[in-house]
Structure formats: C-alpha cells, structure tokens
Amino acid sequence: MQYADLRDKIQSGDIIAFADDGGISNFIRWWTKEDYSHVAIAWHYGRHVMLIEAHLKTGVAIRPLSKALLDSDIVHHYTQPQSYWSDNVEDYALKQWGDTYDLPECVLAGLDEPPEMHSHKFQCAALCWAVMRYGNVPLQMSRATPGTFIKSIVALGSVCTPIDG
C-alpha cells in the first residue's frame, strides 16, 4: 500500500519493521537468521508520523517515517496486537529518547540469549518490547531480535501491511 494511503491509518504504538538490502541490515538478518533487521514504534506528533527507535548511530531517537522510507527497501506496518497506547505509555516511550544503543544486547540477541532490560540502554527490539511491556502487552519473547519481536506481536493478532514509498 502506498504510504500516502496508509499514513492516516497508522496509529501511535503501531510497529514499523524494516528489511533493507545492504550493509548492516544484511549482517543483522544473517546474524539473527530472520527476515527483519530493524523495528520501531510509530508515534503521531501533530500531523506527522514519527518513529521512536533505537539505532546504532543515534541511540534512542525520533525521526519522521517519511524520511525512513527514503532510506529503506522493504518496510512493513504492523498494527498493535491489542490497544495499549496511552498517555502514560507515550510518556514512558519518550523518556527513553537520548538513551544509548545497547550493542552487547544486540550481539547477545543473535546468540539466542533472552532479552535483558538495562536502564537507559536499548537496541531496537528491546525498546519496542519494553514499551509494549509497559503498556501491559503480554509478549512472549525468547530473544530480543526484530524478527522474534514481530512473531510475538503477530501471535497476539497484529496485522501486516507492506508500505510502498
């Protein structure tokens, strides 16, 4: 579906998953043996759809989804598996802004280690997991990888829509 047609249907708390073809994305997909290399939380800020995400270069940051689409080959939108987004969850998610990226957790996730929550350090799947857990979503995750996170929300009823530029 074209982004322009989907934009107004994306809700704060939905998940955006990426499976780019190249560089670090290929390495992450190889390391984890999964389809996705990155996940982020959608957040409406006025008329804008933003992403709250943990990224290797920036730590936990916010950027427009429209800009992320310019840099990405394969992008999928996943609905919330259950309605969990509230003002309190939004506040919790935004309080993580500026936290550092947890590279050791990212490496351990590829080795099938269960997720560990470190205060003020996140990798992308652990950030999404922590925010949904804060909103009382009963995710079952054996490891904190983008693909495992997506499988967990699909098991709870999340629906996928591919996004085209």
Image: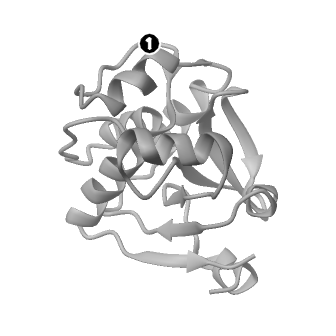
Q: Is residue 41 above or below residue 2?
A: above
> What residue is rendered at 61% in x and 18% in y?
99
Q: Is residue 143 above or below residue 4?
A: above
> What residue is rendered at 41% in x and 38% in y?
31
Give x and y (percent) for residue 8: 66, 77
> What residue is rendered at 34% in x and 22% in y?
108
The image quadrant where one finds the N terminus is bottom right
Tell me which colouring the rendered structure shows.
Answer: one colour
Q: Is residue 125 above or below residue 165?
A: above
Q: Amino acid at mark 1?
A: Ser
> What residue is rendered at 41% in x and 33% in y?
126
Give x and y (percent) for residue 48: 77, 61
Q: Is residue 12 left or right of residue 81?
A: right
Q: Is residue 62 above or below residue 112?
A: below
The residue closer to the viewer here, 9 or 161, is: 161
Circle 1 residue: 119
Give x and y (percent) for residue 24: 62, 39
Give x and y (percent) for residue 71: 78, 56
SS at badge 1 = loop
The image quarter in which residue 67 lies: bottom right
Q: Is residue 7 left or right of residue 17?
A: right
Which class describes the residues within 10 Å of circle 1: few (<14), some (14-19), or many (20+)?
few
Circle count: 1
The image quadrant where one finds the C terminus is bottom right
The image quarter in which residue 157 lies: bottom left
